Image (cartoon, rainbow, N blue to C red):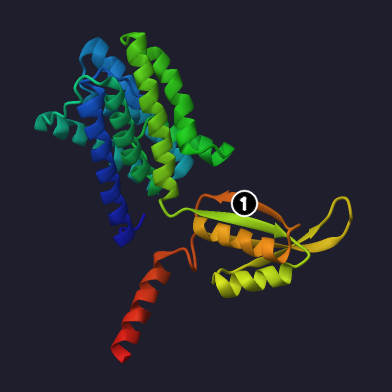
Amino acid sequence: MKLNKQSIIDVIIIFLGASIYAFGLVTFNIPNQLAEGGMTGITLIIYNLTGLNPAYSTLLLNIPLILIGFKIFGFQTLIYTLVGTFSLSANILIWQNMHVVISVDNDMLIAALLAGLFGGVGSGLIYKVGGTTGGTDIIARILEKNFGLTIGRSLLILDMMVLLLSLSYLSVKQMMYTLIAVFVFSLVVDFVQDGTYSAKGILIISEKNDVISARILTELKRGTSFLKSEGAYSNRERNIIYCVATHPEINAIKDICKEEDEKAFISVITVNEVIGEGFSYEKIRRNKRNNKLKQEQS
């Protein structure tokens, strides 16, 4: 792995994510007797049964899984995983020594929501740049790579297994609040990874494809593509319009279709990520530069 600007940024993000995750663990999970999933959950089990600090057990338990991760993902992921693992251990010690106390007035629901929120944001940042904190994160990435499961969903399954073991020191009440935290965690992880700039894909089948496509291009400034298809019943070839648009633009496209062809078939699909013209910050920056130049010229 070459040391460049991007890799340095990635390492900073991994450390930041580990710090956010550790903050939630030390501030909300441990004081409120909330368990955790994955390898961190196992370290909490060990902590409650033996008193061994999770900062140390995290390192001890992750060594075998890190070696597995190296064989599967290669050198860069090994480095990122080592950074994530050591960052998590270091930040647990840092937050423990800072003794930050946030009172939730003994409201376990609020504690569970905050634990899931901080854990999900921190882990999501780490996964977004291709890093892990070791442990079952590696297993989750294997499931994502080979079976297409999202990391959030994979972690939810793995967490349930660890949580069952956590009943060795948790009451049923504490376990139910822990499940809430784990559920919030999985949702936030997927949200952070997908990004806040969401978009939708739209497929349109109509007798007036050319007109609809032209209006989308001219009125919404959105590019469209024609996909070749053949009807299974009619055996007739036709074009399908494919377009990626923002949520507000989807409604505008529906209105265009209704005006041109009330019988048009429309399918709106979820798009997890969009990179390129019209959906990247590069275009936004370019537009700002162009507007600035226009203002200067005027």
Q: Residue at x 47, y 53 (%)?
A: 198
Tell me where residue 272 appears, x and y as whole percent. Answer: 51, 49
- Relative image position of residue 285 (x, y in whole percent): 36, 71
Compare residues 295 and 91 and report the one nearer the observer. Answer: 295
Measured from the top left, where is residue 165 in percent x and y? Answer: 39, 13
Please tell me in which quadrant of the rendered image residue 192 appears.
Answer: top left
**Which quarter of the rendering shows the C terminus?**
bottom left
Does any portion of residue 80 appear in the rendered image?
yes
Q: Residue 186: which quarter of the image? A: top left
Quadrant containing the N terminus is bottom left
Q: Is residue 49 left or right of residue 201?
A: left
Please tell me which residue lies in front, 223 or 145. Answer: 223
Circle 1 crowding by C-alpha within 10 Å: few under 14, some 14–19, many from 20: some
Query: Residue tagged by mark 1?
Result: 268
85 in relation to 223, above or below = above
Measured along the vertical axis of the image, is residue 215 above or below residue 4? below
Q: In this view of the protein, which residue sits in the foreground, 194 or 297?
A: 297
Up/down of 263 relative to 95, above or below: below
- Asked if one can make out residue 246 in the rendered structure from this viewpoint, the answer is no
Residue at coordinates 45% horizontally, 28% vertically from top-left?
156
